[in-house]
Amino acid sequence: QTVVTQEPSLTVSPGGTVTLTCASSTGAVTSGYYPNWFQQKPGQAPRALIYSTSNKHSWTPARFSGSLLGGKAALTLSGVQPEDEAEYYCLLYYGGAQPSWVFGGGTKLTVL
Amino acid sequence: QVQLQESGPGLVKPSQTLSLTCTVSGGSISSGSYYWSWIRQPAGKGLEWIGRIYTSGSTNYNPSLKSRVTISVDTSKNQFSLKLSSVTAADTAVYYCAREVLMPEVDAFDIWGQGTMVTVSS
């Protein structure tokens, strides 16, 4: 069973910078895993932020960026705003004979 | 712009089949290179990808649910559907539908429905 691992929780000060990571139990995450990142606030549906490692949607604030870092997918928030407090999920693609997507467990980001 | 809306019974009895529909508005379900996915989230827990269907009708499923899941598409109604058989309380969750866009070297989830709560209980 493939497991995608994220930090359970992180805390950042307003205006600060924080990096969330996403690791795969199968080994290093590469661009071929097409990492997607989502933000979810309580009572709301997830909102897409980043696709295919580092691409932003038209609605994604500039302070959000995606990358590959040390064998993991990463989401960096620069100049964090109070409204960035939310749960963040990564999603990785596993190709092959039976393609599937696997979500990470999510990172609860607190802005304090 | 394209919007997705889930619909279906909010209460299903154990051992029965859960059936949900996602209606696509603002665009054709069969135009472009899209997969249409189902994702669920138990209360207070994380997201779980259930499966997807391509505009051609080909499907992929989460291996852990594959034996119980069927996803289908009705292009005439601009809808795609989820059936999950032999449900138990563990299938109680908010169910979301979402669109996955395929482009050269790119694979993007972009649009999500608002979600629908399904409770499995007698």
Image: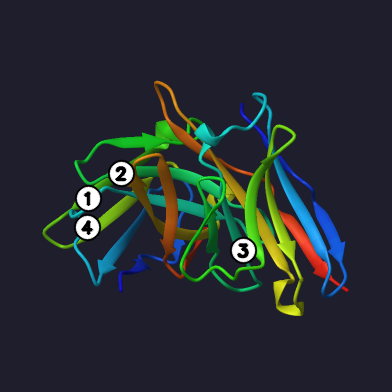
- Circles 2 and 4 in contact, beta carbons < 8 Å: no
Q: Residue at x 65, y 71 (%)?
A: A41
Q: Residue furthest top?
A: A97
Q: According to the image, what is the colour scheme of the structure?
A: rainbow
Q: Nearer the viewer, mark 1 or mark 4?
A: 4
The residue at which mark 4 appears reads as B29
Residue marked by disc 1: B73
* 10 Å crowding of disc 4: few (<14), some (14-19), many (20+): many
Q: Looking at the image, do the residues carrying marks 1 and 4 touch, with CB atoms under 8 Å apart?
A: yes
Q: Residues within 10 Å of mark 3 (few under 14, many from 20)?
A: many
Chain-order first, disc 2 or disc 1: 2
Q: Is residue B53 left or right of residue B11?
A: left
Q: Amino acid at mark 4?
A: Ile
Residue at mark 3 to residue at mark 1: CA–CA distance:
28 Å
Say which of A68 and B102 sits in front. Answer: A68
- Are the residues tagged 4 and 3 within 8 Å (C-beta)? no
Q: Nearer the viewer, mark 3 or mark 2?
A: 3
Q: Position of B51 compared to A24: left or right?
A: left
Depth order, front residue of B91/B75: B75
Tag 4, which secondary structure?
A: loop
Q: Residue at x 74, y 65 (%)?
A: A78
Regarding mark 1 in the picture, which secondary structure is present there?
A: strand
- Is residue A111 or residue A17 the one in the foreground? A17
* Sequence-first disc among 1 and 4: 4
Chain at tag 2: B
Q: Which sits in the foreground, A27 or A65?
A: A65
